[in-house]
Image: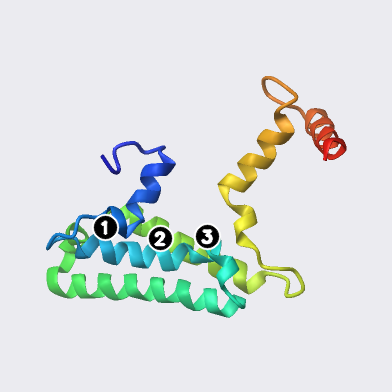
Amino acid sequence: MIGTQRQSDKQAAQVLNPAHILREWDAFGILFFQYIESLAISPWLCDRLYDNLEDSFFNVMTAYYFLQLNIMNLQKDYGDEWFRHTLPRVTLQNTFADCGHFVARALYYPSDVPFMLRKQLEWTCETHFSDVKKYFRGMPKYKDMIIGETCNRHQS
């Protein structure tokens, strides 16, 4: 049942978790992808484990170059049909985009500001804005956001 619901956070977590993959002879490909994807998104999900920005940068670059090497070898073996033997094109594009976004942030991030990418994850933002919006129904306006934020501050 893993991967049958595109909007399921639980299934998305299972796809990235090696414990949910059957240990069969053909599982190496998905395990390798899980490893690459884990390296690529680790600055967002595991940033507390890094001592500095450079360590997370090396992980992302390792994922990027693993994917590049994989594509290079597939092109050598299969020519123009290489894409039939790897991840779906959209998955490759998204993974490369994750790597690129991280590099851009790392290069242009102010050195005196803590680099906490976990604060920019969808769950963090969704929780914050749903907390602010809980006082209203429908499409909120700017005034509703200000009032909701003020109400939250007075409650805490």
Is residue 111 found left or right of 99 in the rendered image? right
Image location (x, y in percent) of residue 72? 25, 74
Q: Secondary structure at mark 3?
A: helix
Q: Nearer the viewer, residue 87 or 130?
A: 130
Residue in the picture at 79% in, 28% down: 144
- Near mark 2 (Cα within 10 A), the count class, few <14, some 14-19 or many ≥20, is many
- N-term-proximal mark, 2 vs 1: 1
- Near mark 3 (Cα within 10 A), the count class, few <14, some 14-19 or many ≥20, is some
Q: CA distance from mark 3 to mark 2?
A: 15 Å
* Residue carrying label 2: 95
Q: Secondary structure at mark 2?
A: helix
* Residue carrying label 3: 45
- N-term-proximal mark, 3 vs 1: 3
Residue in the picture at 30% in, 63% down: 33
Give the foreground label among 3 and 2. Answer: 3
As drawn, 129 above or below 14: above
Q: Are marks 2 and 1 in contact (CB under 8 Å)?
A: yes
| Residue 87, numbered circle | 1
- N-term-proximal mark, 3 vs 2: 3
Residue in the picture at 74% in, 34% down: 132
